[in-house]
Image (cartoon, grey):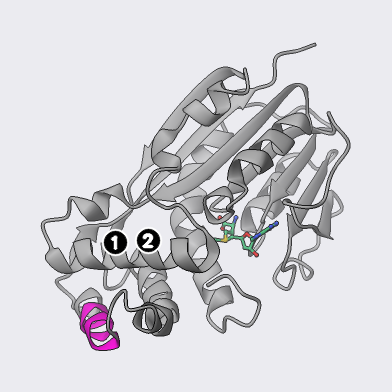
Amino acid sequence: MFAVENPSQRERLRALAAVCDPPTKAVLLRWAVRPGARCLEVGAGAGTLALWLARRCPAGDVTATDTDVRFLTGLRHPALTVLRHDVRTEEFPPGTFDLIVARSVLCHLRERDEVLAKLVSWLSPGGRIYIEDPSFFPAASSADPVVRRLGAAIASTLAAAIGSDVETWARSFPAPLLGHGLAKVGVRVHCPTLTSDNAAGSAWRLSVADLMPIMDRRGILPEAEASAALARLRRPEFIDVAHAMIAMWGVRPPA
Ligand SMILES: C[S@@+](CC[C@H](N)C(=O)[O-])C[C@H]1O[C@@H](n2cnc3c(N)ncnc32)[C@H](O)[C@@H]1O
């Protein structure tokens, strides 16, 4: 789903950013960023957050990493560095960053626990980490059987295809950070409303369209059923809540 050849990736990343950026920024704005802060965004995607961070701390240094930097290389800001970097296999020196952000990345990595441990080790003493990921638990309790079935089908397909966990990982927040001994730990939940004409609905429709052949091939959801579900998501009267974006954060205690 997140492969380089995925034709709708740019559009999907833009839709995700449109849905997620305002609530993410609202949390990040709670914390002062000192001049000269060193920030890292892992899996920066379309780079909207990384660019915003660079504008927030122009005297600092914001590193935006991704395994697919196609949509990042065109971004220009003196405080922004774009780096092709695989968070599973590549390193930064311990204690490098004052702020680390990773949104909708760890849920898709089988090695999420090991990766989180690495991210924490890259924090400077007093540095803050912000992790945000989706959980589909609202789809499971939808009154609409099509949304229930679609949510379960997408979750199983992502799990089988790339090892994602969009069900239990984010729902377990903030336990993963507490396990690393972080201080000032907090959690925020944002449940976007899906409609036929908003960005959240668009992100869902693009994901369903991308996953349709895989869901069909793996016997998870026949293509005809997925097409019918897509048609339902396009209806003007469609409105539901299908996933939650759950954020957790914490501070590495000063040495
Ligand atoms: C769902 S997108 C989220 C993009 C962005 N963080 C956002 O929330 O708008 C996941 C991003 O993580 C990147 N990614 C996937 N595996 C990665 C890895 N091992 N290391 C770094 N980035 C990775 C993908 O290329 C993609 O840009």
Residue bearing the label numbered 1: 152
Residue bearing the label numbered 2: 155
Task: Kindly identify the residue that appears in the image at 13 percent across and 65 percent down.
Answer: 145
In the picture, the disc for residue 188 is none
Task: Kindly identify the residue that appears in the image at 72 percent across and 68 percent down.
Answer: 68
Q: Is residue 236 magenta?
A: no
Quarter where residue 76 is shown = bottom right
Quarter where residue 219 is shown = bottom left
Crowd band around label 2 with a 10 angstrom C-alpha radius: few (<14), some (14–19), many (20+): some
> Is the residue marked 1 within 8 Å of ligand 1, measured from its CB?
no
In the rendered view, does 248 fall on the left or right side of 70? left
The kind of residue tagged 1 is Ala
Residue 37 drawn above or below residue 43: above
Magenta segment: 223-231
Q: Main secondary structure of the magenta part?
A: helix
Image quarter hosting the C terminus? top right
Q: Nearer the viewer, residue 65 or 24?
A: 65
Visible in this render: residue 81?
yes
The kind of residue tagged 2 is Ala
In the rendered view, does 184 fall on the left or right side of 239? right
Q: Is there a contact, CB below 8 Å, between mark 2 and mark 1?
A: yes
Residue 199 place in picture, x, y as percent: 39, 66
In the rendered view, does 66 fall on the left or right side of 154? right
Secondary structure beneath dot 2 equals helix
